[in-house]
Image (cartoon, helix red, strand yellow):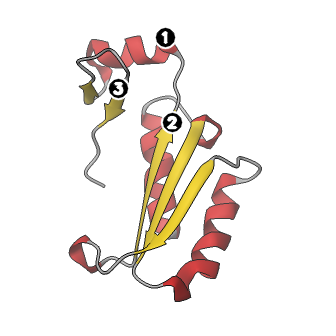
Amino acid sequence: ANQVMKNLAAVLDFIHADFSHVVKTGIFLQSMDDFQTVNEIYAQWMGEVRPARATVAVAGLPKGVLVEIEMVAALDIAVQAMLTHGEGDLLGSSSGGGYALKSDD
């Protein structure tokens, strides 16, 4: 979980954001036995930030990982504009609803 949060911090940093920009998270666990440990690590990284969150147990995760965490961050329009002009690998929304950063981590 610590490495996952470290990876997410790096992705946020790449888009000139931090955990204060996160508005929603989803945590997927192989086993709910890991909930307390993952929750403690998550809390250490998130600090006082408390976005909407769901934590669920799943039957399996890719590559045998024990935890997967997804985050949605809200960005300033100026940051979105900068990223769409060559500084990021963004997936655009055809409806104009927003953008997502593509990351394989």
Q: Residues within 10 Å of mark 1 (few under 14, many from 20)?
A: few
The residue depicted at 37 percent of the width and 20 percent of the height is 97
Q: Give the camera-side residue of 63 and 98.
A: 98
**Quadrant hosting residue 62:** bottom left
Q: Which residue is the extreme one toward the bottom?
A: 33
Task: Name which residue lies at 39% across and 79% down.
Answer: 66
Q: Which three-letter amino acid code belongs to the residue tagged 2? A: Ala
| Disc 1/disc 3 C-alpha distance (Å) | 13 Å
Disc number placed over residue 55 in the picture, else none = none
Mark closest to the chain's N terminus, 2 or 1? 2
| Amino acid type at image mark 3 | Tyr
Looking at the picture, how far across and down is residue 25, in whole percent? 52, 52
- Residue 92, x across and y down, in percent: 26, 23
Q: Nearer the viewer, residue 86 or 48?
A: 48
Residue tagged 3: 99
Check if mark 3's residue and mark 2's residue have beta carbons within 8 Å.
no
Relative side of 80 to 21, left or right: left
- Where does label 1 land, which residue? 78
Residue 73: give its label.
2
Q: Are marks 2 and 1 in contact (CB under 8 Å)?
A: no
Q: Earlier in the sequence, mark 1 or mark 3?
A: 1
Mark closest to the chain's N terminus, 3 or 2: 2
Q: Residues within 10 Å of mark 3 (few under 14, many from 20)?
A: some
Numbered disc total: 3
Residue 29, by quadrant, is: bottom left
